[in-house]
Amino acid sequence: MTHALPLAVTMGEPAGIGGELSLRAWLARKPADRPFLVLDDPTRLIALARHLRFDVPVREIGRPADAAAVFATALPVLAVKLRAPATPGRPDPVNAPATLEAIERGAALALAGEIAGVVTNPIQKKTLQDAGFRHPGHTEFLAELAAGAAGKPVEVAMMLACPGLRVVPVTIHLSLADAVRALDAASIVRVGRIAAAALSALFGIARPRLVVAALNPHAGEQGTMGDEETRLIAPAIDALRRDGIDVRGPAPADTLFHPAARATYDAALCMYHDQALIPIKTIDFAGGVNVTLGLPFVRTSPDHGTALDIAGSGRADPASLIAALAMADDMARRRHT
């Protein structure tokens, strides 16, 4: 696969497990895998590999095109320098600019067609926000970067995916109370359209089947436990059907995620964060992947956090990052990159 564009893995929170995951993913590489490079501080990765006793040669490269020739024998790194040494488990806002630089450079390289996609290691949102970052997370930041390049707004949605389930939350990084207040038919329609288009373009599903979860218990029980189903969700489903999308619901969320139910749809639209993430993390806690739908480039991420409590210990599980790399590769193939 030396002809294929490489993927780029971002630094993530330098005090978290991202560096260890990148090292472990390289150690787990197979000859047929698409090469990847890491946007990170090579000095940090060399020291981390030594500390963890990982046999990972680290080689700094000057451009993404150099990654393929290096990947078989060393981890290719495009240097993003930290402002201060990173201490595992202790995030420092002084390094926030480097974390953001890695994301920005990854997006810029993807938009320029120099890489096949971006795989983002987990960030510590509070640390970034303490340093002035104004976005709730990766999804919103990447949408802004893509919009800046396009000169117009870019509509995105977040998907969590594993081999047994795909879920797309309509509201994302909001408290439960704020999510209920923010929910409206237009948002459900917007996310449903993005999800259906992405299932075709990125997952190769010719006619995607969507199911829309209810917000309330028992889908509102004919209005006795809430009216959002009849007032917001059902009209949104009708609008999606008018677009020609195969969609059903509102379906009670408590009967939506057992194996027989999952076999009847390709993705579930969920009304709030935990309604989507609890089932996928129950089904495949280690291997779930976060995908940003609607971007003009491929972006995936492990579906977990920075794990500050085990950073530097050598106990981080790379399964989700490896799955994110594999999914990004598959999506890039469908986009012919």
Image (cartoon, rainbow, N blue to C red):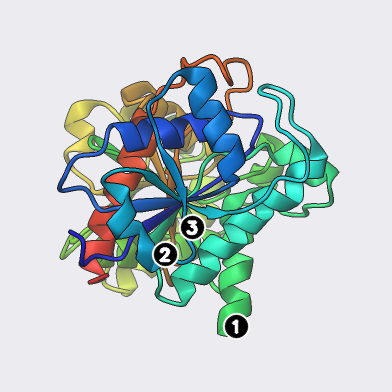
Question: Label 3 belongs to which residue?
Answer: 157
Q: Quadrant of residue 224?
A: top right
Q: Amino acid at mark 3?
A: Ala
Give whichever of discs 3 and 1 has the lower sequence position. 1
Residue situated in front as seen by the camera: 206 or 106: 106
Residue situated in front as seen by the camera: 114 or 69: 69
Question: Label 1 belongs to which residue?
Answer: 152
The residues bearing labels 3 and 2 have C-alpha atoms spaced at a distance of: 28 Å
Q: How many marks?
A: 3
Give whichever of discs 3 and 2 has the lower sequence position. 2
- Where residue 70 appears, as percent x and y from the top left, is 33, 53
Residue shown at 41% from the left, 26% from the top = 281
The residues bearing labels 3 and 1 have C-alpha atoms spaced at a distance of: 16 Å
Residue situated in front as seen by the camera: 256 or 310: 310
Residue situated in front as seen by the camera: 200 or 209: 200
Answer few, some or many: residues within 10 Å of disc 1's Cα (few below 14, many 20 plus, some between 14 and 19): few
Residue 152 against residue 246 in the figure, above or below: below
- Where residue 84 appears, as percent x and y from the top left, is 78, 39
Answer few, some or many: residues within 10 Å of disc 3's Cα (few below 14, many 20 plus, some between 14 and 19): many
- Where residue 76 appears, as percent x and y from the top left, is 42, 50
In this picture, residue 213 sits left or right of residue 337? right
- In the picture, the disc for residue 64 is 2
Q: Amino acid at mark 2?
A: Pro
Q: Amino acid at mark 1?
A: Lys
Circles 3 and 2, Cβ within 8 Å, touching? The answer is: no
